[in-house]
Amino acid sequence: MEQLKQQLSAITDEWVEAGYLTEGNLFVVGCSTSEIAGERIGTSGSEEIAAILFDQMKKLQLKTDVQLAFQCCEHLNRALVVEKQTMERYRLEQVSVIPVPKAGGSMASFAYKQFADPVVVESIQADAGIDIGETMIGMHLKHVAVPVRLRQRYAGHARVNAARTRPKLIGGQRAVYTRDKMPGPACD
């Protein structure tokens, strides 16, 4: 467990150092505690592992002011646990369910118990996220997702993938995407 804490701390530190996250960003966490333990997804959930991950994600939140969303397992259609204030702020749609380890997953169940005023929402459009154990968070990311190549590629036995998002680039070859490349007067 100490090694897992160190791995997750390295991941958290790397997110902070990268500077991708800003106040108010939605950050989705998808996690299989079974995969972290070296087992097949959905077979050996662990709230002990969930507690370690939750603590690291709360540290990330404190350092970046992001809003956390913990993805449930497929039995709850990958719904997400968030604080009620997050649901209200982003006008998310609440669903009626309370995640438990066997229907929702150990991570989402643990987060639900730790949040001050938890609710479950059906979907979000997150600005960034982390996927530990290949739980497929892509459905909850804004378009366009950009991979974040973390140096720490594993948490326990689970592969770690991460992504941030950026606005869509529109307009074709004459379009300008940064202020420093803006042309002078308009042409006719």
Image: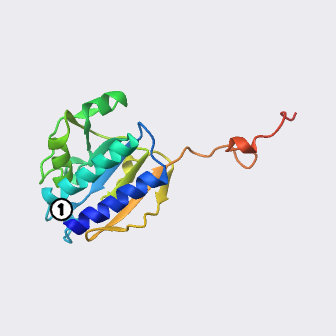
Q: Which residue is mark 1?
A: 42
Q: Is residue 136 visible?
A: no
Label 1: element kind: loop
The relative height of residue 18 versus residue 27 in the rendered view (above or below) is below
Which residue occupies the foreground of this view, 64 or 25?
64
Quadrant for residue 62, please give it.
top left
Mark 1: few, some, or many residues within 10 Å (few <14, many ≥20)?
Answer: some
**Residue 67, image x, y percentages:** 34, 39
**Residue 4, image x, y percentages:** 25, 65
**Residue 149, image x, y percentages:** 46, 63
Give the amino acid type for the residue marked by disc 1 in the picture. Gly
Q: Is residue 158 left or right of residue 110?
A: right
**Residue 182, image x, y percentages:** 76, 40
Quadrant for residue 68, please give it.
top left
Q: What color scheme is it?
A: rainbow
Q: Quadrant of the N terminus?
A: bottom left
Which residue occupies the foreground of this view, 148 or 121?
148
